[in-house]
Amino acid sequence: MSQWLIFSLLAGGLWGVWGFLGKVANQHLPPHGVYLIGMLGYLPVAGFLLAAQGVNIPWQPWGWGAAWGAGLSTAIGLFCFFRALASGEAALVVPLTAMYPVVTVILSWLILKEAITLRHLAGIILALAAVWLLSK
């Protein structure tokens, strides 16, 4: 099995657990508390990466800017996600927010000039249908 597939399946599974635990946490804490305490979960991973890789990251302005933008997008999106979970059902919030690949596909097509195939379009339509089917 390819490495990318193994890590993709692990990421998807862990994100499923993340969505569930985020809802459980929001039943006991306010969204800002869930967010701030959740950030502590990044520390062991950051510590591991620093220990294993060090801080040797080459200076590439576009790479650093894009990485910083990705982090900021993740941070703001995560807070919005926890706010949504605080008042919405996990079974609805998680699938709806999981539509983010549609944004990636469209931005990649517009900016990176990546192709959108009929298969991609079918996937987007089926994903939208799935979210609709999961909604009330």
Image (cartoon, rainbow, N blue to C red):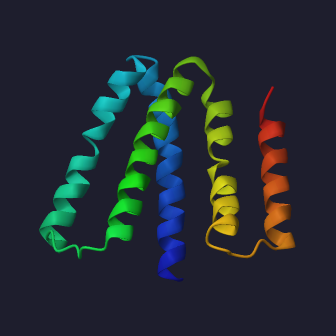
Using residue 38 as the reference point, say whether residue 8 is left or right of it.
Answer: right
Instruction: In the rendered view, tell whether residue 61 sits above or below residue 22.
Output: below
Q: How many labels does the image show?
A: 0
The quarter holding residue 68 reads: bottom left
Residue sitting at the far bottom: 2
Q: Identify which residue is drawn at 52% across, 20% down.
A: 86
Instruction: In the rendered view, tell whether residue 5 sits above or below residue 135.
Output: below
Q: Nearer the viewer, residue 96 or 22?
A: 96
Q: x, y (%) of residue 42? A: 28, 48
Q: Identify which residue is drawn at 64% across, 60% down.
A: 107
Using residue 73 as the reference point, say whether residue 51 is left or right of it.
Answer: left
Q: x, y (%) of residue 35? A: 36, 31
Q: x, y (%) of residue 136? A: 81, 25
Instruction: In the rendered view, tell whether residue 134 sits above or below residue 54.
Output: above
The quarter holding residue 118 reads: bottom right
Residue sitting at the far front: 61
In the rendered image, the quadrant that contains the N terminus is: bottom right
The quarter holding residue 5 reads: bottom right
Q: Which of 36 and 65 is in front in this view?
A: 65
Q: Identify which residue is drawn at 49% across, 39% down.
A: 77
Using residue 75 as the reference point, say whether residue 127 is left or right of it.
Answer: right
Q: x, y (%) of residue 76? A: 44, 38
